[in-house]
Amino acid sequence: MSYMHIGKDFTPPCAQGKITGAARYAEDFRREGMVFARLLTSPVPSGMVRDIDVSEALRMDGVVGILTAEDLPAAPRPGVPALSNELTYVGQPILAIAAISEQIAENALERVRMNIERRPFVVDPLDSLVEGGPNAYPEGNVMMRGENGMELRSLKWTRQAVEDFRAGREPAAEFTTEWSYGDLEAGFAESTVIVEEPFVTAGYPHHSLEPRTCMAYWENGRCYFHGSLQSQSAANAPLSRMLGIELDQLVFINETTGGGFGSRIGPYPFMSIAGYLSRKVNRPVQVRITREEEFFIGSARSGMQGWIKVGVKPDGKVAAVDVIIVNDGGSSGSGSGSSSAGAISVSYQPTAMRFRGASVFTNTTPRGAQRGPGQNEMHAILAPVMDKAARQLGMDRVEFRRINAPDHNSLVEANQGPVTSAYMREAIDMGAQMFDWQAKINQPRRNGSKVIGIGVGEGYHAAGNNGFDGIVRIGPDGKVYLHTGVGNLGTYSYAATVRAAAEVLQCSWENCEIVRGNSDLGLPHSSGQGGSNTIFTHTRTNYVAAMDAVAKMKEIAAAELGGSPDDFSIDGTRVFKTATPAEGLTYAEAAQRAIALGGKFSGAEYPEDINDLTKLAVQKIAGTGLVGVAKDNLEKNGTAPGLAIAFAEVELDLDTGKYEIRDYTAVAECGTVVHPKGLSHGMNGGGVWGFGMAGFERHVYDPQNGLPANVGLYQSKPPTFLDVPRAMHTAAVNLPDPQSPFGARGIGEPAMGCAAAAIMSALTDALDGHLFNRTPVTPDMIIEHVAQNTYNNKSLKINTF
Amino acid sequence: MSVNPRLTRRRFIKGVIYSGAAAMSGAGVYLANAQSRPAAAVERLISINVNGRTRRVDVLPQETLAHTLRYKLELTGTKLGCNRGECGACTVLVDDVTHYACSMLTHSVKQRSVTTIEGLQSADGQLHVVQQAFLDELGPQCGFCTPGQVLATVALLKSNPRPTRDQARDALAGNLCRCGAYDHYLNGVMRASGQLS
Amino acid sequence: MPSHDVMPDIELYQPVQVEDALDLASRLAERGWLLGGGQDTYGWLKDRNKSPEAMIDLNGIEALRGIRETASGLEIGALTTLTEVATNPLIQASYSLLSDAAVKVASPQIRNVGTVGGNLVQDVRCWYYRRGLSCYRAGGNLCYADTPQGMNREHAIFGASRCVAVTPSDTAPALVALDASMVIRSTSGERVVPAADFFVGPNVDIRHTTVLQPGEILTAVRIPNTWANATFYFEKVADRNVWDFALVSIAVAMRESGGVIQDSRFVAGAVQCTPRRLEAVEAAVRGKARGEATAMSIGTLASNGAEPLTHNGFKMHLVDNLAKRALLA
C-alpha cells in the first residue's frame, strides 16, 4: 500500500526547538511574582511525624508559605500521598515551603522542627513475608481481597517456604494472585526437558532526564498548570479532581516532556503541591524537583523474586510453564507479576500455564509502570532459561523460538484471548538473516581472556487501545489543523499519529498545523501514552476524526452543488464531484460554509459519545472552521501485540567481568511502520534501556537503616555513550495489522525487553550455559562466577547486592 | 534582602531576578564580610560575556553558572538534569571548551566567553551546521539533553573537524541521554562533519 | 531530611598570587575550602554535608598551572586540568601511564575543569559517608559499611581501620607508580612529600586521605625521570565506562632490560584507602621476562592478605587478574 504520509520520514515540528534550546519544559516557564518551593522529605524509612513546628521557618524573611498534609485532601493508603505525616520510605515528602528564592526555601527547611516516631521497617519483600518479619505498614504488607474489597493485610510464609523459594524450590505458601489455563500436570508429563530455576530482578528508578518540576498559578478562578507528563490530555480530568476544581477550570500546559518511560503516564500526586501551594499563597509557585527527589518520588520498576519451571516436548513445543513471582511493591504500587507471566504466555505459547504471586510492600520508593513493566524483566530472565531448554533438546535457540512464536491464531495472556495479528516468525527470520546468526554462532569464540557470546531474546507488550477521541479542524484559510491530546514525550508519536488524519484528508504536510501543548487550544481526550499504545490508538482517533471531516465536507458540497455526498471525492485541497471534478469547493470554502452552517459542521454540535474533555475542546473551537470530531468506535477484537526480537554479540572479558556489545540487531513487529525515524529511535532507545537493565541499573537499599544508596545518576548508572554498541541495527517486518486503519501497532516497550533478553542470552552463551538468573549482571558477579565463587550461592535478594 | 510588601510587583520581580538567592541570612553574612573584605574577595556586580554580549549581572559568590543563565539571563536552553555534573544537560562552552554549568561558579567566567545553545544560531536565525545536522538526522528524542549534545559536538568539531565515530563517542561521552538516542546523535555528528551525505 | 541542591551561602576569594592564597588558607584554616575544579566541592556544599565559610578559588593563579620539563623530570602545576594532563605531549611521550590514567577520570567535561591536584586530594566516595551519616570519617563512632549487612561492594579489601572507604583517584596510583612527589606550600614554607607518603589511611588520619594540613596548598606534582619511557600499563575497571569510579584500577611501570624486568612498580587503586603498592608482585617479577609464564607465576600475590567484606570479595580476583594482565599486555 502506498501512502502520502504513512511510512515516510518527516521532521516533527518540535525538533527545531529541541536543537535550538527554544523548546520549553515545565521548569522553563516564569511568571510575574513567581516563588520557589522546596520539599522537606523523610529521613526515616518508616514512622509518624508528630508535632511539626514551622513557626521559626515561617518567620524568616522571604518565606511566603508552607503546605503540609493537612492542607490536602486525605489520600488513600497505601498510596502515594503528595505530602504525608505517615512516613513509609526515606525521601517521602512531608511538607513544602515557598519562598522568594530557592535558597531561602532551603534555609527555611532547616528551621522546621518535628518529632518523628519511628516504626519497624523492611526493604526486602521476603524479609517481610517470612513469619515474624516486619510489615511496611502497621496493618500489613499486601493488598488482598477482603470483606470490603481490596484491603491491606499481613501475608506470612513459613521460614521453610522462604528458604525453599530463595533456593529455587517451589515453596508451600499462600499467594494473593493466581491464574492458570490448560492442564499443567499433563504438560509436564509429556515434557522430556524440564528446566527449573529461581530468579531475581532488581527494581530501579526511571530517572527521566527532566526532573518533574511543576509551576502553577491561579487567575480568575482557573488554575494554569505547567507540568511534565507523557500525555497532554490524560492530565486534565485526574489533575482537576486532584485540585478539587471543574474540568474547565484547569489549563494544562505541557509543550515538551523530558522523558517519562512510564513514570508520567497520568498526573502524579506531587503535582498537587504546586496547585495547592500557589492557591494558598496566591502567587505562582514553581516546585523544582531535584535529581534526588526525582529518585524519591519519580517512581521505579518493581523488583521481582521468582521461581520458574518450564516443560518442553521432544518436538520443541513448550508444553507447560509454572511460575511464581513475589514483587517488591515498594511503599505503594503493585507489582507486575501477572504481566510478567502473561508475557511468557505470548512469547512461548505454552499449552498449559500457571501463575502464582504476591506483591509485597517494602519501605522503599513507590513503584509504578516502567517501560514494559513485568514483561521486560521477565524476558530478560526467560531468555537464558529457554536457551537452557533448547540446549538440552539439542535444538538451535533461534529455531526453538521460531517453533513457539505467536501468530495470528495465537491465544495470549491469562484469559487466552485472541490477537489482532502477529508476525513473529517473520520477525525472527528477518532478524536472524540480518544478524547472520548461523555464521555468528559458528565463529571462533575464545581469544585470550576474551570470549564471544551470541544471544537472542524477545520482547512483548500489548500495544494498542481504543475508544479515545480525535479532532481535526479545517480552517477558513484552507489549512488543516490537527488537534492532538497526545503528549510530546520524546517519541514524536503526537506528530506521527496526526499524519493519519493528513493521510485521510490527502493534504500536503505543509498545509497542516499541529495544535497541541495547551488544553485551552481545544485538544481531544487522549490515552496516557503508556503501554506502547499511542501509534495504534491514535492513528485510529485521527482516522475517525478525519473521516468525519471528509463526510462533512462532502455533505456541504452536496448541499451546495447538488447530488449526494457519495458522489463526491477529495484531493487534498478540494472536495469535488467525482464525475465532474470542475464542480467543487476548496477546503477553505467548505470550512467557510461550515462556519456559516453551524451545527455539527462548525462544532456547535458534537457527538454525545465523546469524552467530556473533548466536548470542552470542541466548544472552544466551535465556529472557527469545519470541525471533524469523533470517538474511535472502530472494531477491536483481541490484544494488539507489540513484538520484537533482538540478537546480540558480546565480547566478555573473563578477567574483568566487563563486556562489549559488538553487534546488536533488533527487528520490530509492530504492523505497518508509520514513522521510520521514530521507529528507529524507539528501537535503539529501547535497546539502550535493555542494556541498562541487563548490565547496570538497580536499586541498592541498606537493610540496616533503610537508606537508598543510589539516589543520583552516577550511582543509578544509566548507560552512557561508551556503554552501548558503536552502531545499532534495527528493522521492521512492516506488515499491516488488520484492525488498525493504517495497519500500525506500537513497539516502545518490547524494544527494551528484547535487548535485555538478548544480552542475558549472550552472557549465558559466553559462559558455557551458566545462568545468572538475575538482572542486572554486573562485573563483580561475572568475576565471582569465573573464579567459581558462584554468585548464586548467596541468597538472592531484590534490593541488596 | 528582606521583602518589602510595598514594592511594586515589577520591582519585586526584578529583586528576585537580580538578587536571586540572596537569602536574608546569606546577604547578611555576605555584607558583614564585605565590610571587612580581604583584598581578594569577589565583587558581586560583574560583567560576563555570554553569546557574544557583555551582560552586567549581580552574582552571589556561590552562584553556579547554570543558575545565572537560567534565572538571571533567562537562557533556559541550558538544562538542569542533575545539578551534580552527572548528566551533561547543562553543558555550555567556556572559551570553546565544554563545561558543566551546574558545577562551576559564575564568578569563574568573568574574563572568559560563554556560549550557550541560544548563541549558536547566526544573527539572521540560520541554524548552526551542527544544529542543522542534528535536525536532519532527528537526533533528539525528548530533547532535554540535546542542547548539551549539540554544544559538545560544536566543541569537538572546532578541534577535530572530521572525527571518527569513535572519537565522536569519546567527545560526547559526558552527555547522558536517558532516551538512548546515542546512535542518532552520532549520525548527527558525522553529518555535521560532512561525513554522511 | 531536606533534599538540598542549592549552593548555600559561602564567601568566595579569588586570589591571583600564590602568596595571597596561602595567606587566606592560613587565616581561614579549617573554615576555608580550597577550590580547584570544584568537582568534589559543589556536591558537598549543595548537600550541606560540609559547611566551610569560604572558598578560596585557586584557578586565577597562573603559577599553579602548566607542565614544565625540569632537569630531573616533569613538574605539573596542581591546577593543571586532567584534560591537559591527558593530552600533553611530554606526558604522553615519556610518562603515558599518567595520561592513560587521567583520560579515564569521570567524563570529558569533568576532566576539562578537574585538576590533577583535585583528583589527588578528593575525598572518598563511600556512599554512607557521602549521605551525611555520622560515621567514623565524619566524626562519629561507627562504620555502616563494615558490617555483615553493609552495602560494601565498592569498599576496601585491605587496610581497614574503622573506615573501609577506598581511594577514588585514577591518577593517584599512576603517580605512586611513577615515584612522583608532592610539593606542598604554606605560609611557613614548602615541603616535598613522596607520593607514597602523601596518601594516608584511616589508621593514620580518619578524617583526611592525605597529609595536607589546614593552611597548606598542594602546588605541584613532580615526576622524576626514574620511569621515563618505561613499559607502562594502566587499567581501570568500573561499572560504566564514563563517570564511574574504579572498582579496581592498576598502574604499572616496568623497567626492562635484556628481556627481563629489572624493576617495577605495581600499584592498585580502589582496594584500600590509599593507592596500594603490590610489593610482593614487584619482587616476584624482578628478573623475569614479561609474558604468560611470569603472569601465571604471580598467582594471588596481589590479593594476598586481603580481608574482603560481605560483598567485595570479587576485588581480590580482579586485582590479581589486573596484575597479570599488566605482564601480558
Image: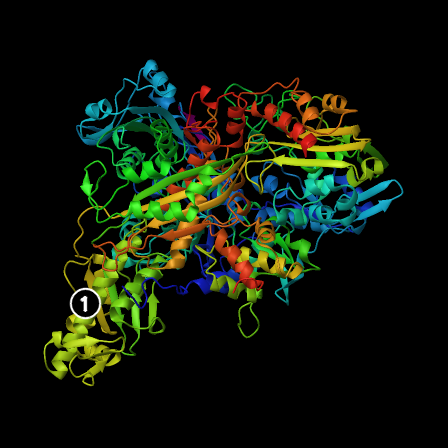
Q: Is residue A714 left or right of residue A411?
A: right
Identified at 85% across, 41% down, the residue is C73
Q: Position of residue A295 (x, y in %)?
A: 45, 40
Is C239 drawn above or below residue A286 in the view shown? above
Quadrant assignment, res B123: bottom right
Q: Position of residue C276 (x, y in %)?
A: 70, 27
Is A382 drawn above or below residue B21 in the view shown? above
Q: Position of residue A59 (x, y in %)?
A: 49, 44
Q: Secondary structure at mark 1?
A: helix
Residue annotated with mark 1: A548
Asked if the magenta segment contains residue C39, the reply would be: no
The prevailing secondary structure element of the residues shown in magenta is: strand
Q: Position of residue A651 (x, y in %)?
A: 52, 38
- Residue type marked 1: Asp
Please report, as a chain letter, where disc 1 is located: A
Is C282 drawn above or below residue B84 in the view shown? above
Magenta-highlighted residues? A115-119
Is A75 drawn above or below residue A542 in the view shown? above
Residue placed furthest toward the top: A160
Classify 10 Å Cα crowding around label 1: few (below 14), some (14-19), many (20 and above): many
Q: Is residue A566 left or right of residue A463?
A: left
The residue lying toward the viewer, choosing from A550 and A176, is: A550
The residue lying toward the viewer, choosing from A502 and A100, is: A502
The residue lying toward the viewer, choosing from A631 and A281, is: A631
